[in-house]
Amino acid sequence: MPGFELFDHQEKQQVAEVMDQGFTFRYNFDGLRNDVWKARELEQLICQRLPVKHAHLVSSGTAALSTALAAAGIGAGDEVIVPPFTFVASVEAIVLAGAVPVFAEIDDTLTLSAAGIEAAITPRTRAVNFVHMCGTGGDMDAVKAVCDRHNLVLLEDACQATGATYKGQALGTIGQVGTFSFDSVKTISCGEGGAVLTNDERIHQNAHQYSDHGHDHIGNDRGAEDHPIMGTNYRISEMNAAVGVAQWQKLDRILEIQRANKAALKDALAQYDEVTFRRLTDPDGDNAGFLSIFLPTPARAQEVVRQLGDAGIGGVFYWYANNWHYLKNWPHIHAMHSSARLPIDLIKDRPDYSEIALPQSDELISRTVSFLIQLSWDEAEIEKRLAAFHTIFH
Ligand SMILES: *Cc1c(COP(=O)(O)O)cnc(C)c1O
C-alpha cells in the first residue's frame, strides 16, 4: 500500500517549487506565490481522476472525517453506525463531533453488511460511516439502498482505498461524502494529509469553510472575508500538497504494481484447502493494498501468523490481537477515556461500549490474516513468501 516507497526526485521537485517560488499557505498571498497553488492543483487532479465534483484537501484523514461529519450536518447526539474493524480515527471523529458511535456487524467482505447496518438503526441514526478496509469495499448497492431507505447520510471512509472502484465508480464518491488519507503509510502519501470528496455543493461549501475557521474563500483579501459558519483549522500546507501532486501522478503505476504482487501471492495461496479469501464485491476495482485470507479456526490463524514470523515474513497482520484496528482491543474506547469530559458523557442512555457484542465480526476477524502488499518487492521477495507458504499452509 505505501506510496512513499516510490518517493523520488519528482516529490523533491514539487516541494522545491513551493520553497523556491511559492508560499506555504494554501490560500491568498497572491503576490508572494508566483502562481504556485499546489493544494488547488492536487484537488483538480483528484476531481478529474475519480471523477468527483469536489475534492477538498485537509491536514489528515482524521481531519477529513471530522470535516465530512460536520459538513454533512452530523453533530450533537446524532447516532452514526460504524464497524468494529477499522482504524480508531473512525470512532474518534464521531465522538469529537458530539455524536454517538453505534457499532454494527461486518461480513466476509470485512466491511459493514447491509443487514448489520439495518439491525443497528434507531430513530436517532443519522449516518453510516462505511469504512472500505484494506483497499476495497463491500456490497455497496445494498448498503446505499439501506441508507437511502432510512434517509441516512452515507459517509465513505476510503482512507485505505484510494484508487479503488466499485462497478466503475470510485470508492469515496458513492455516498454523499467520502474521505481519503494521505498519511505516511497510505496508497498516496503527502507526508500528512487527507481529502473530503463530494458531489454535493452544500457539503463542499461547508467542508472548505469548516476546515478554515469558517472563511468563505471569496476574493483575495483574507482579512475581508465573511465567516458564514464556525470552524477550526484543518488546513493542509502547500508543502504536503506538493508531495501529493507528484504522488497522485503515480497512482496508476502504484495500482498496477500492487495488483501484480497481490495476484502472485493469491494465486499461490489458492492451492491450499485450508485457505479461503475475503469476498471481493468487485475484484477488478480492488486497490490491492492488502491480501486478506481466512483460516478454518482462530487457533490455526494464530499458528500461521507465528510460523510466518518465524520464516521472517514481515507485513503480516492478525487484527484480532492488534491494538490498532479492532474494537475488542480498545479499552480507552470501551471506557470513553479522554483527557477532558466529552459531549457523549452528557448523553444518559448512550451505549455501554464495554459491553458491545458482535459475535459475527469476532468470528470472522479471529480467523483473518492480512498481508500488506508492497511496491518495492522484487522477484526474490515474492519467491521468499511463496516458499514460506509452501511449508506452512495445508
Ligand atoms: C489512516 C486512516 C484514517 C486516518 O487517516 P490519518 O491521515 O492518519 O489521520 C482513517 N480511517 C482509516 C480507515 C484509516 O486507515
Image (cartoon, rainbow, N blue to C red):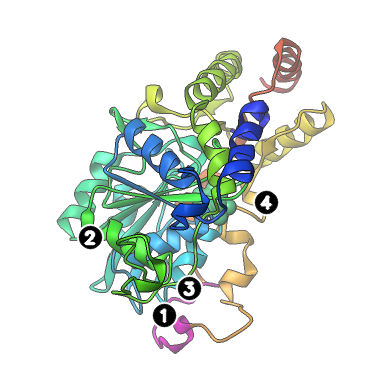
The residue type indicated by label 3 comes to Leu
Can you tell which mark lies on residue 350? 1
Q: Is residue 208 above or below residue 122?
A: above
- x, y (%) of residue 117? 32, 56
Q: Quadrant of residue 2?
A: top right
Camera-nearest residue between 50 and 143? 50
Coordinates of residue 222 in the picture (x, y in percent): 40, 67
Foreground of the two, 43 or 126: 43
Amino acid type of the residue tagged 1 in the rendering: Arg
Mark 1 → mark 2, Cα distance in angstroms: 30 Å
Instruction: Tell me whether circle 4 and circle 2 mark residues in contact (CB < 8 Å).
Output: no
Question: What amino acid is at disc 4?
Answer: Ala
Q: Please state, as top left, top right, bottom left or bottom right, where the N terminus lies in the image.
A: top right
Q: Which label sits on residue 96?
A: 3
Between disc 2 and disc 3, whose residue precedes? 3
Would you call the spot at circle 2 few (<14 residues within 10 Å), some (14-19), or many (20 or more)?
A: few
**Of the residues under marks 1 and 2, which one precedes in the sequence?**
2
- Provide residue 349's location: percent of width, then percent of height: 39, 84
Residue bearing mark 4: 321
